[in-house]
Amino acid sequence: MNFKFLYIFFYLLLFSCKKEANKETTLPFFNSATFTPEWILKENIGYKDIHIIPEFSLTNQNGQTIGNNFYKDKIYVADFFFVSCPGICPMLTKNMHILQEKFKEDSEVLLLSHTVMPWRDSVPVLKEYATENKINSKKWNLVTGDKDKIYDLARKAYFADENYTKTQDEGAFVHTENFVLVDKKGRIRGVYNGTLALETKRLIRHIEILKKEL
C-alpha cells in the first residue's frame, strides 16, 4: 500500500473540506454585473481592487441629505422601487420591513431604498409612503434626487439593472427585484430576490455572518 499517496489524498480532502466550510461562513465579493462570487483573501493582490459603492448624495423622506457618510462603517441593504408601482414594489417594501423589524435594535444594520421615478416621488410623496408603511427613518432611508445619478448608481454601483447589462440602453426604465447587501467598507457581498420570503431569510442569515467579519 502506498501510504504517501494516501497521505496526500487525505490532505487534499481535508483542505477541500476546509475551503468549502470557509465559503459557508465567509461571504464572497461581487465585482461586476455578472454577480460572479469571488472569495478574495486580504493578502490577495486583488483585495485592494474590490468594487466599492462610489460617493453619492441624495435626499430622504425627511428632506435630509443622505450620502456615504450615513452608511460609513455600517452594513446595509439597498434596493430600487417607486411609490406608484403596482407589481413587485409592495413585496420589496414588505420584505424590507421584515429586515427593519429584525434589526430594529441593531445599529450596525441599515436600509436604503432608491426611487427610480424621482420626477414623481418627491420628498412629500416619500414621506407619506414612509408613514403609510411604518418606515423608521433612523433605520431606513427612502431617497430621491437627480434621475441620471440614481440610474447611474443602480447600473454601475449596485449592478441592479439586469436589462441594462444586456442592452446598454441608458434611456430604459430601471426596475429590479434585487436586494443588494453592502458591507461596512461599501463592498457588495450578496444579491437576493427581494420579492421572496425565502431569500429574505437567506439575507438575514448572511447579515449575521457579515457582522462577525473582522
Image (tube, helix red, strand yellow):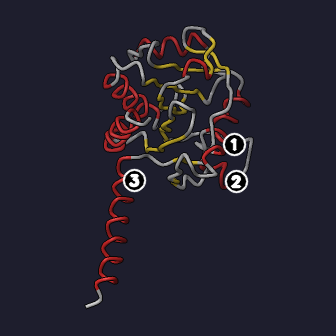
Give the SS element for disc 2. helix
Which amino acid lies under the numbered mark 2 shown in the image of this protein? Thr
Separation of disc 1 and disc 2 at Cα? 9 Å
- State whether residue 166 is above or below residue 206: below
> Which of the two marks, 3 or 2, is nearer to us in this view?
3
| Residue highlighted by disc 3 | 23
Q: Earlier in the sequence, mark 3 or mark 2?
A: 3
- Residue at (38% x, 15% y) in the render: 134
Residue at 54 percent of width and 16 percent of height: 126
Q: Are marks 1 and 2 in contact (CB under 8 Å)?
A: yes
Q: Is residue 13 above or below residue 172?
A: below
Looking at the rendered structure, the secondary structure element under dot 1 is: loop
**Residue reaching furthest bottom?**
1
- In the displayed structure image, the side of residue 172 where residue 31 appears, left or right: left
Alpha carbons under labels 1 and 3: distance apart: 36 Å
Task: State which tag comes first along the sequence, 1 or 2.
Answer: 2
What is the crowding at mark 3: few (fewer than 14 residues within 10 Å), some, or many (at least 20)? few
* Dots 3, 2 in contact, CB < 8 A: no
Mark 3–mark 2 Cα distance, whole angstroms, equals 33 Å
Which quarter of the image is occupied by the N terminus? bottom left
Residue 42 image position (x, y, % from top left): 54, 45
Identify residue for label 1: 172
- Quadrant showing the C terminus: top left
**Mark 2 sits on what residue?**
167
